């Protein structure tokens, strides 16, 4: 199976979307083209504000602009929105619950920039912050339709965004819906909950698992906070042999933990296996290499299913290699980082 | 040079005296308080609230509301301490007070200028009250939440930028303490305010050279402060922070850049007894009945 590849889904879409929204501003911290808003800046120069490499101050300015009725959309890499300016995010933006949109690029291990550029614990940290809404897009359709969802939230929103060459997994006419999981398959044995780029990765393995008679209920989750979708609880409750989560994030505090909380609160007594970074930092290398090195890939999903069910499923690594791997040198990747 | 009427100056002197008196009375009653901040900033805040700031008038002093909860997603009715500054309008000023531990001093200034009810201080530091010890945005006179120091200047920069976009004539003022010039974010804000041409942003600083651990020069030096700030392209005026005519003149000077008034102040001004506590002046808590009695006598002198 291979998906349509959309080149820079955010770039023109965000320009078109913002056309009739004069209160929408963009604040950028020297990663403008890397976050696909260079053309936005050239289209709406009066609504674009360069804040330089000074994120603490950028978040404070955003708070002031939001208090005056503007809707600032901050564009930079995920790490620079919460890790360096965490106190500013909390005291200037989250506490007063201001309508600031934090558009974070290169979540998790999507960047060869290494530990300094890899937001591996952002969801864990931001989930603990009152008033925050956390969204994560999993494909081009969601990267484009998340704008309406974030815009409608009457409080601060953090988005794990995708850029460059992005697969379209979900039909363009099935947009991102707030706090609503996508049910991608149903089956009685296992429930699999995936988010972000892990969904596409899981989809490589699922047909092979199904061919071997394993019933899998697979949900793609794109709203990580709030995490109160009854469809998720129902899917967890229907899992006969276990629940698996897959996230581009540390297994502590993110999707896997959110699922664990729901299972405990709802007395769902089946084993839970969390696929993600196992309480470790990563390093600089290609996404594909890192996904394999740290077990964030389809192979890891197969192994986890085998462990849960106690079966050797005899799925060769070659079988999992069907899907595309993005070309590092393609025209969509104008920036090295 | 701008001249100010003697009546204005007399009124400001009255406010400043009232600030010191109220904070001292309260400190005695509570067996503790941020007293040196009242001594250093009384004239500066009296100038702001008693002449410099253009605020919408209030019909009558406001009775501080009880605490109704923190801001939350979808809660549109949240009323901040800005209500004590009057209704917002394009032509009016804003004041973002950065050192939130000056709360008691600011409450006193609000009372002296008829914006907070005189008995409002009875709610100070009481459970369930908005008149908190460290002000947050529900507290009288606090428009934003600034107790994590150095965040106010960036917030005010955003407000000033927004008001520039909206072509509002009112200025955005920030009251800062000198300790905040040890925080890196302050310098990020200075460079951004200049870069974005925020000539509607004005800052007044209580340079009392004292901080929690003691004299600033022993904790972390910030001088030469004027040269530092000028280096960021700001207009800077240095004044004696107890010279109200000089503060008023500096505050009304036309500028084409963001402007900062550095008020060099004396943290024991008006209460020389406090000097016995030097070098650590940040918070006054009486060591015993003897010291408390001394301050009671000083208060009696002050109200004579």
Image (tube, grey):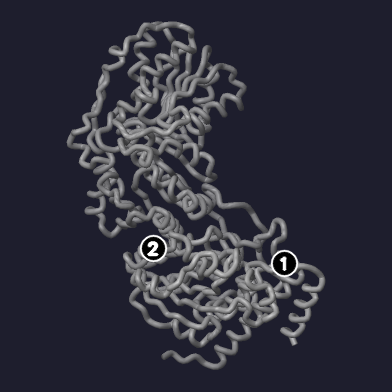
Above or below residue A115? Residue A205 is above
Q: How many marks?
A: 2
Q: Position of residue A42 (x, y in %)?
A: 22, 54
Disc nearest the viewer among 1 and 2: 1
Above or below residue A26? Residue B227 is below
Chain letter for the residue marked with disc 2 in the picture: B
Mark 1 secondary-structure assignment = loop
Disc 1/disc 2 C-alpha distance (Å): 42 Å
Q: Label 2: how many residues lie within 10 Å, few (<14), some (14-19) or many (20+)?
A: many
Q: Are marks 1 and 2 in contact (CB under 8 Å)?
A: no
Q: Work out whether residue A65 or residue B202 is closer to the camera in this orientation and state it.
A: B202
Location of the N terminus of chain B by quadrant is: bottom left
Drawn side of residue A232 relative to residue B234, left or right: right
Question: Mark 2 highlights which residue?
Answer: B162
Drawn side of residue B253 relative to residue B46, left or right: left
Mark 2 secondary-structure assignment = helix
Q: Position of residue B303 (x, y in %)?
A: 73, 84
Q: Label 1: how many residues lie within 10 Å, few (<14), some (14-19) or many (20+)?
A: some
Which corner quadrant of the image does residue A194 belong to? top left
Above or below residue A117? Residue A49 is below
Above or below residue B249? Residue A127 is above
Q: Position of residue A239 (x, y in %)?
A: 52, 16
Q: Position of residue A173 (x, y in %)?
A: 31, 31
Which corner quadrant of the image does residue A182 belong to? top left
Q: Work out whether residue A325 or residue A225 is closer to the camera in this orientation and state it.
A: A325
Question: Mark 1 highlights which residue?
Answer: B285
Residue most extreme to the front: B218
Q: Residue at x 26, y 55 (%)?
A: A44
Q: Work out whether residue A27 or residue B27 is closer to the camera in this orientation and state it.
A: B27
């Amino acid at each position: 199976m291979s998906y349509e590849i959309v080149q820079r889904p955010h770039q023109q879409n965000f320009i078109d979307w913002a056309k009739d929204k004069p209160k929408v501003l963009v604040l950028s911290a020297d990663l403008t083209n890397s976050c696909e808003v260079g053309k936005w800046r050239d289209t709406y120069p009066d609504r674009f504000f360069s804040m330089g490499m000074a994120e603490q101050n950028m978040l404070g300015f955003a708070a002031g602009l939001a208090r005056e009725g503007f809707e600032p959309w901050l564009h930079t890499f995920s790490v620079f929105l919460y890790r360096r300016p965490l106190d500013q995010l909390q005291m200037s933006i989250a506490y007063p619950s201001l309508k600031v949109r934090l558009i974070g690029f290169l979540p998790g291990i999507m960047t060869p920039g290494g530990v300094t550029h890899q937001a591996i614990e952002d969801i864990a940290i931001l989930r603990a912050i009152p008033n925050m809404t956390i969204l994560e897009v999993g494909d081009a359709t969601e990267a484009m339709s998340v704008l309406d969802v974030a815009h409608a939230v009457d409080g601060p929103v953090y988005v794990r965004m995708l850029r460059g060459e992005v697969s379209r997994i979900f039909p363009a006419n099935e947009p991102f819906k707030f706090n609503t999981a996508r049910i991608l398959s149903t089956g009685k044995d296992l429930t699999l909950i995936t988010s972000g780029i892990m969904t596409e990765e899981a989809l490589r393995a699922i047909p092979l698992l199904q061919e071997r008679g394993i019933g899998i209920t697979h949900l793609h989750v794109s709203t990580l906070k709030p995490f109160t979708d009854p469809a998720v609880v129902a899917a967890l409750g229907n899992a006969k042999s276990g629940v698996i989560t897959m996230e581009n994030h540390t297994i502590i505090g993110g999707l896997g933990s959110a699922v664990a909380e729901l299972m405990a609160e709802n007395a769902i007594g089946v084993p839970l296996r969390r696929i993600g970074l196992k309480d470790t930092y990563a390093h600089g290398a290609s996404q594909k290499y890192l996904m394999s090195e740290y077990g964030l890939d389809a192979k890891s999903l197969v192994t986890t299913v085998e462990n849960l069910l106690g079966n050797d499923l005899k799925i060769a690594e070659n079988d999992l290699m069907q899907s595309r791997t993005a070309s590092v040198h393609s025209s969509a990747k104008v920036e090295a980082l | 040079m701008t001249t100010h009427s003697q009546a204005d100056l007399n009124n400001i002197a009255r406010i400043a005296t009232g600030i010191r008196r109220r904070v001292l009375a309260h400190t005695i009653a509570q067996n503790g308080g941020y007293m040196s901040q009242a001594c250093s900033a009384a004239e500066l805040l009296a100038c702001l609230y008693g002449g410099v700031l253009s605020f919408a008038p209030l019909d009558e002093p406001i009775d501080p509301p009880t605490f109704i909860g923190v801001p939350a997603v979808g809660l549109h009715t949240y009323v901040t301490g800005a209500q004590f500054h009057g209704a917002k309008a394009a032509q009016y000023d804003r004041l973002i007070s950065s050192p939130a531990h000056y709360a008691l001093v600011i409450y006193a200034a609000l009372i002296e200028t008829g914006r907070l009810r005189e008995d409002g201080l009875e709610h100070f530091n009481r459970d369930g009250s908005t008149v908190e010890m460290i002000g947050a945005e529900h507290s009288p006179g606090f428009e934003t939440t600034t107790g994590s120091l150095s965040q106010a200047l960036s917030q005010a920069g955003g407000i000033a930028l927004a008001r520039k976009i909206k072509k509002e004539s009112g200025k955005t003022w920030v009251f800062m303490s000198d300790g905040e010039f040890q925080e890196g974010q302050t310098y990020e804000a200075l460079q951004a305010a200049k870069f974005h041409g925020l000539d509607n942003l004005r800052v007044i600083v209580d340079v009392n050279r004292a901080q929690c651990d003691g004299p600033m020069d022993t904790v972390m030096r910030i001088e030469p402060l004027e040269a530092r700030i000028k280096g960021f392209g700001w207009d800077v005026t240095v004044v004696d922070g107890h010279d109200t005519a000089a503060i008023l003149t500096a505050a009304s000077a036309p500028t084409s850049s963001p402007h900062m008034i550095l008020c060099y102040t004396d943290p024991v001004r008006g209460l020389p007894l406090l000097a016995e506590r030097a070098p650590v002046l940040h918070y006054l808590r009486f060591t015993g009945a003897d010291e408390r009695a001394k301050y009671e006598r000083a208060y009696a002198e002050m109200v004579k």
